Image (cartoon, rainbow, N blue to C red):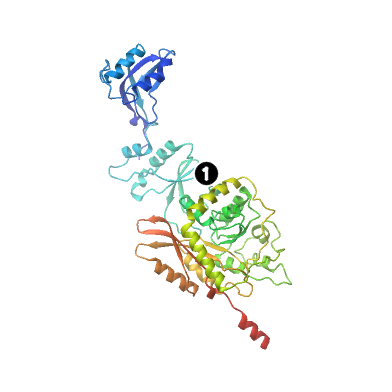
Amino acid sequence: MEKLDESKFEQRLQLLALRIPRELASAVTRLLRSGCLLDMPRVKPVVEDPESDKSRLVVLSEKIQNPDLSDIPEQARNLLKQLCSVDVVPYTLTLGYSYWSADHILKQLLPAGVEVPSSFETIGHVAHLNIPDDLLIYKDVIAKVIYDKNYPRIQTVANKVGAISNEFRVPKFEILAGKNDMVTEVKQYGATFKLDYGLVYWNSRLEHEHIRLVSLFKKGDVICDMFSGIGPFSVPAGQKGCIVYANDLNPDSVRYLKINAKINKVEDYIFTHNMDARVFMQTLMIVPDPEAKSQFAAANCSSEETVSANENSMPNGNHNDVQEICQESLDDSSVVNTAKRRQETSNEGDVACQEEDVNQTKKRNNKKVKSSGPLPVKPWEHIDHVVMNLPASALQFLDCFSGLVQKRYWKGSLPWIHCYCFIRSSESEELILCEAQNKLNAKIAEPIFHRVRDVAPNKAMYCLSFMLPMECLKDETEDNVQSVDG
């Protein structure tokens, strides 16, 4: 398509204006404000008089066409004459390219009847477009208009190219306008997140869900974030005083997660990992040999998939010098009672918890969490919540929980699993629950489905929350008996 000609959008309006003494401008506008003044967005009805700095021009509505002002109600006209001597002069208002909205301009440029792509997702200074295939021939002019109408808030306009096919959930982009810089910052619930939108996954539309889930966490809780990304769950959990084990397969996501932990001053609360999610969970549940305390840390760097334990698994360098935490012993009644209490909290207290959570988080912003540091923990003994934010395939990873936890080492209630998934209009919650139970090889008691958002006309994102079934625990009693007999 040929270059955009901005002059084509100029429009001149021939209007009337009143020349009045400068000091009476406010009084005259109050007198004529009911339908007699020019009323257009971003256009002031009182302007400077090019002929004298002692007077002003009050621009009249386009409905006022007679120089004798007979179009103005008689009462207002009489009061105006009593107020001052008035000169009626012609006034030309020129509305150019800069005045019109992106939607107005694109409607003039694109074929009639097509949906105008004037909306977009904003990630810091980046505008993320999804231009349909039939409009790709207009992509450059669309991007220019979006850029012009939103600068300086928007400084880079990028269009997604093709479907997301890589293992890191990161789309490919083509920069169409502005600077070639996808490194940006976003703010959510009092936290700052730095990211390279071309290298990591981010979805601004999930802010409310981030707030909702984190509102269920309590200070001191141990959180396991299996698909952490750059930290939209991990960082606010750390701000709340939770101990977070965060993992992502994308090394760039882990790199920015570490950066964001430092930006938000919670690096002592977040232990980062870079490996497959199943390997991550198995690594956390390894019970170290008491005679070789370094075994657990060594497990984090024994594979090419893992990052250095010293760099990414130990924010304060003392991961092995842990002290035992006194916790309640595991019993079935505590599990059931906790499940009921959590369900009541989820269904009845979401709004109050979220509002309180946001206010508290904002107060903590830009300062360290008020603590001497995180409480030392042993994840193979207790985790409170597991977050599985990979809706396209998180259900497939539930099989890693079967036999993962060793019952004889576990203390306290079993963890809550928050598994995100997609449900199409042709599917049901019962179908998803059945799939989850098949993966766990156990029955889920009191599952909670929370509808997060619609992602397509016939597809929605959900969060399935449940307490890990007791059947998933690994009971080694029989192995010990056989060992003694042998």
Could you say which quadrant of the image residue 473 lies in? bottom right
Could you say which quadrant of the image residue 450 lies in? bottom left
Image coordinates for residue 31, horizontal then vertical, percent: 35, 21
Image coordinates for residue 23, horizontal then vertical, percent: 43, 15
Using the image as rendered, state which of residue 238 and residue 148 is in the foreground: 238
Residue 405 vertical position relative to residue 32 in the rendered view, above or below: below
Q: Quadrant of the N terminus?
A: top left
- For image coordinates 70% across by 58% down, the residue present is 317
Q: Secondary structure at mark 1?
A: loop
Q: Quadrant of the C terminus?
A: bottom right
Using the image as rendered, state which of residue 425 and residue 85 is in the foreground: 85
- For image coordinates 67% across by 59% down, the residue present is 375
Instruction: Mark yes or no: residue 201 visible.
Output: no
Relative side of 286 to 114, left or right: right
Relative side of 482 to 9, left or right: right
Name of the residue lying farthest toward the bottom: 485
Instruction: Mark yes or no: residue 42 visible.
Output: yes
Residue 54 vertical position relative to residue 208 in the rendered view, above or below: above
Using the image as rendered, state which of residue 30 and residue 390 is in the foreground: 30
Q: Amino acid at mark 1?
A: Asp
- For image coordinates 38% across by 27% down, the residue present is 43
Task: List the residue tagged with mark 1.
Answer: 181
Relative side of 167 to 137, left or right: right
Image coordinates for residue 299, horizontal then vertical, percent: 65, 67
